[in-house]
Amino acid sequence: MSDRTDLSRRLLAEGVGSFFLFATVIGSGIMAENLAGGSEAVALLANTMATGAMLFVLITMLGPISGAHMNPAVTLVAASRSELRWPDAAAYIAAQIGFGILGAWAAHLMFDLPTLQLSVKARNGLGQWVGEAIATFGLILTILGTVRHRPHWVPASVALYITAAYWFTSSTSFANPAITVARSLSNSFAGIAPNDVPPFVVAQLVGAFLAAVLAKLLFVVEHNH
């Protein structure tokens, strides 16, 4: 199989995964808000369970094809570790954002909402930014450590980490620059105001970078002499 054909398959996997993940985050948020009777705790719990479940499915199904990144922070770390060529990483990120936005629009369509919208939900301040940095730091560390020591556990580890991080971080753990962009295009439970996107993404990338540095120290590959 040629590199181009292989890349096409991987990009399709990233696109399909991002579509379903982003549609799940936004769609389950809309459904949860509709059914929770005004309880934000119940709505967040429903949103969390749907997201964690979908992550497990998508990583199990698509991981063998593309790595199931569905997240530019994961892709950039992979490229920085020479696990992915930089041109391929750029294509991955384009697929994640493009198909992810289609997923957000699909969620709106399913719930009879205007397809094109912008969020007015403010998410800003030091606490939220620290929350995003820690959420992304933990996600990257979870991925790199589990890939190193228990590769078959990656789907469960990532799904369980995000499930927990929805609750222990102040930002409800976006931990993903692409989904942050997509969520700014949804004035729903999962939304974020467009003005608040840049500092969230900066915090995510800082967290990812620090996790990649720590992973080199923690998860050393031992060479047999």
Image: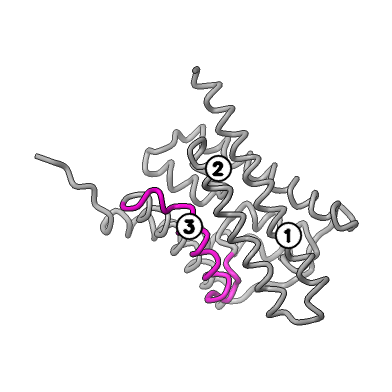
Residue behind mark 3: 156
Q: Are marks 1 and 2 in contact (CB under 8 Å)?
A: no
Which quadrant of the figure contains the C terminus? top left
Q: Residue at x 68, y 53 (%)?
A: 22
Nearest to the observer: residue 164 or residue 90: 164
Q: Position of residue 202 (x, y in %)?
A: 54, 60
Amino acid on which disc 2 is placed = Met
Magenta highlight range: 149-173
Q: Residues within 10 Å of mark 1 (few under 14, many from 20)?
A: many
N-term-proximal mark, 1 vs 2: 1
Cα distance in 3D space between marks 3 and 2: 12 Å
N-term-proximal mark, 3 vs 2: 2
Q: Position of residue 166 (x, y in %)?
A: 58, 70
N-term-proximal mark, 3 vs 1: 1
Nearest to the observer: residue 184 or residue 163: 163
* Label placed on residue 61: 2
Q: Position of residue 186 (x, y in %)?
A: 78, 60
Q: Residue at x 55, y 67 (%)?
A: 163
Cα distance in 3D space between marks 1 and 2: 21 Å
Amino acid on which disc 1 is placed = Ile
Q: Residues within 10 Å of mark 3 (few under 14, many from 20)?
A: some
Q: Above or below — where is 197 with respect to 11?
A: below
* Label placed on residue 119: none
Residue behind mark 1: 26
In this view, the residue farthest toward the top is 2
Which type of secondary structure does the marked residue at label 2 adopt?
helix
